[in-house]
Image (tube, rainbow, N blue to C red):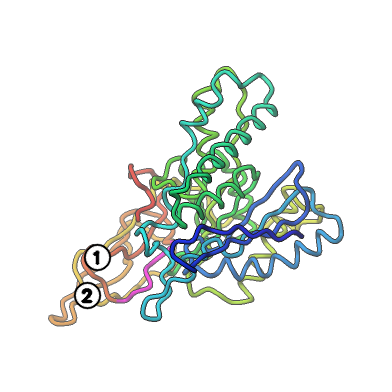
Amino acid sequence: METRHHPLPAGSSDCQYTLSSFHYGRPGAKKAYLQASLHADEIPGMLLLQHLRPMLEKAEAQGLLRGEVVIVPVANPIGLGQTFMGDQMGRFDFATGGNFNRDFPALSDQLIVLLEGKLSADRQQNQRLIQTGMAQLLQELASNEKNSPFESMQIILSRLAHDADIVLDLHCDYEAVMHIYTSAERLDDAQLLGRYLGARAILTADVSGGACFDEMLFRPWLDLRRKFGADHPIPPPCFSVTVELRGEQDVCHSLAGADAQAIYHYLCRVGMIAGQATVMPPALCMPTPLAGSMTVYAAAPGIISYAASPGDDLRAGDVICDIIDPLTGLSYTVVSPVDGVMYARGILRYAKRGMALAKVAGKVAQRTGDLLGP
């Protein structure tokens, strides 16, 4: 195993953060990349990787790794250092207000210009050209002296992951069951990973809005295929997913250990590790469009009393919660707008008008535009 440290530019005098990556195996035919807590207050992924790393060390010592596995256990040292009056505030950058998982480098347009006239009929050669082009563009972005620590961190993470075959970006929701966000292009892979992890929802979109980390890794391949695919074979995009490891309070050795074991066996199943994967677990859900996921909101303030829990299969009209005015005692009921599993809900129990309360994975696309929200 090799440890690499990636210093971020100092945002202020004597104040500098460093990203650390751990590289198992060696560069070769396959590469997997896993990072945790890009939203730095989402901790389950950090603990999961602490359980996975000894497994990878053992596999490496036994010569079982069939490529390179890169682990970034703290993907956001900036956010990890942000607290306000005792609360961890790791979703937005204090310095810029930016969401740490939005506005990652968008390379498609520049890649199209860079590769015009260079692609051939050789699929593997085209793959190398695309990955080399991505590396070149990211290097050019990295050389910009005006980059903030936040921007530099995003570029470093992109450079570490841009040539991976598998990318797992480990997050969590407020209160939730296991669920996955991914491209519709890699449904078979998403279902395989979902079976090992026990996912209750697999939400698919090729354009979700916001330029989040996982999408900015697979989108260039889709855009290049649309531009050049009629004349030149473009390989499918990397399998790049956001894994939501239940809720932010689900941080314990039993869950982290089981999830790490599931990912290890998934890596065995896809040929990253020469080992016997466990029998494939049954699927707990089928993929549904992210555009079919419906968020319910509070129409008025009040005390929230939930009737539905994450993982419940709901029908349209089923009760999600009641909201009670603490002064008048009057209440109103919030119901599910669609059939589907309620895969996440808020952690607060007092609602302000317009606050998101819960998410239900509907089967029919109904939304357009920014599908992820802030």
Q: Is residue 100 above or below residue 134?
A: below
Q: What is the magenta range?
A: 343-349
Question: What residue would you read off at disc 2?
Answer: 302
Q: Is residue 350 above or below residue 233?
A: below
Q: Secondary structure at mark 2?
A: strand
Whole-percent x, y for residue 363 in the image: 42, 47
Q: Are marks 1 and 2 in contact (CB under 8 Å)?
A: yes
Whole-percent x, y for residue 94 in the image: 37, 65
**Which quadrant of the structure image shows residue 35?**
bottom right
Q: Residue at x 50, y 55 (%)?
A: 201
Disc count in the image?
2
| In the displayed structure image, the side of residue 74 where residue 360 appears, left or right | left
**Which quadrant of the structure image shows residue 69?**
bottom right
Question: What residue would you read off at disc 1?
Answer: 298
Whole-percent x, y for residue 298 in the image: 24, 65
Q: Residue at x 14, y 82 (%)?
A: 327
Q: Nearer the viewer, residue 305 or 349?
A: 349
Q: Is residue 344 magenta?
A: yes
Q: Secondary structure at mark 1?
A: loop
Identify the amino acid type marked 2: Gly
